[in-house]
Amino acid sequence: MKKFLGFLRSCVYGLLALMAVCGALFGYFIYSPDPEPPQVSGTVTKASIEVGELKRTYRTYLPKDLPKGGPLLVVMHGSGQNGAQIRLETGYGFDRLADQHRFAVVYPDAGSSDWNDCSKIGDFTLNGREVDDVRFMVALADKLITEIGVDRNRVFATGVSSGGFMSIRLALEAPSRFRAVAAVSANVPAAENFKCKPAGQGSSVMFMNGTKDPLVPFAGGESSLFGLFFKGGNVQSSRESGQYFADINKIGGTPTTIPAPLSGDDNAKVGHTVWRNDGNVEVELVTIQDGGHGLPQPYWRRPRLLGPSPMAPDGAKLIWDFFERQRP
């Protein structure tokens, strides 16, 4: 009996030790405290819209005294998340900018685990049906144009990870509705993993990617976490993705490149490659040297599992600066 009790005690101690190790690993690699909500002028409202016999939900942030005819920004979350989470994980950065620059923000919720982007690989179904997220985004933008009175010629979209990949699809298949998009931690799917049907030139596009992203490889290859989780198939490199849209938008010539320094503070470790001509569309690749997966910003440190999390530059501001210079 004493031997059994000793064995049982050893098992309990071992289990407690294992739990302590797991807790420590969770705390180090996954946990990250939420950012402090800022004092903003407006309110967040949750609403829904029916698209293709599916009820789709979203949240809007409208600054106080938003003028008629202001811009609209759509912000899309990553896999397995919702609009409330991407609002938090971007450090409420777009709400802060909306107060400063007087634009409306909408945070839609995906119908499935992933947004139905241009990749062939992913979870794109709800109740056994493939979700049409392009139709949802266009319908949502049209609804807010009517309800809020935003400028139909200044509708922009951005997203992180799966939301970034969805931004790419909007630029390709709905350029008449979305004047420009910014894809964060996302690249154009490789040819064998590509299902979109480009409508032709139209949207300006920004890519913002980290060179040490463990999920979406900056140099191209398989999009996944450790080859086991969040599999999205093969993608082109970030440079190839920028060139892809430059070709679609018929922007010839060599892009202007300001390489990212290999040393210095986080603000300095940013490179820019810009494809631009005399037209009204452009393509830009923002390279976050030594950056991981997610939007760089000063308000929230991302989990270590997603790679390095530089607190600069302010990614949301770079994105809005890009959008603001686009003209109808």
Image (cartoon, rainbow, N blue to C red):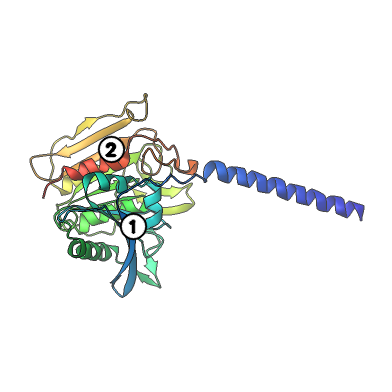
> Residue 134's spot in the image, x, y percent?
26, 62
**Quick check: can you spot residue 189?**
no
Question: Extreme right residue here?
Answer: 1
Q: Position of residue 229 (x, y in %)?
A: 47, 53
Q: Is residue 294 left or right of residue 50?
A: right
215 or 327: which is nearer to us? 327
The residue sitting at the top extreme is 264
Say what amino acid the circle numbered 2 marks.
Val
Instruction: Please report the residue visible at 72 percent of the width from the left and 50 percent of the height from the top.
Output: 15
Question: Dot 2 surroundings within 10 Å: few (below 14), some, or many (20 or more)?
Answer: many
Q: Which quarter of the image is occupied by the N terminus? A: bottom right
Determine the secondary structure under disc 2: strand
Number of the label disc, if any, that sits on residue 286: 2
Is 63 positioned to the left or the right of 248 in the image?
right
Q: Amino acid at mark 1?
A: Val
Query: Residue 23 location, x and y as percent?
Result: 61, 46
Look at mark 1 in the image and give the residue it sits on.
44
Circle 1: is it few (<14), some (14-19), or many (20+) Cα within 10 Å? some
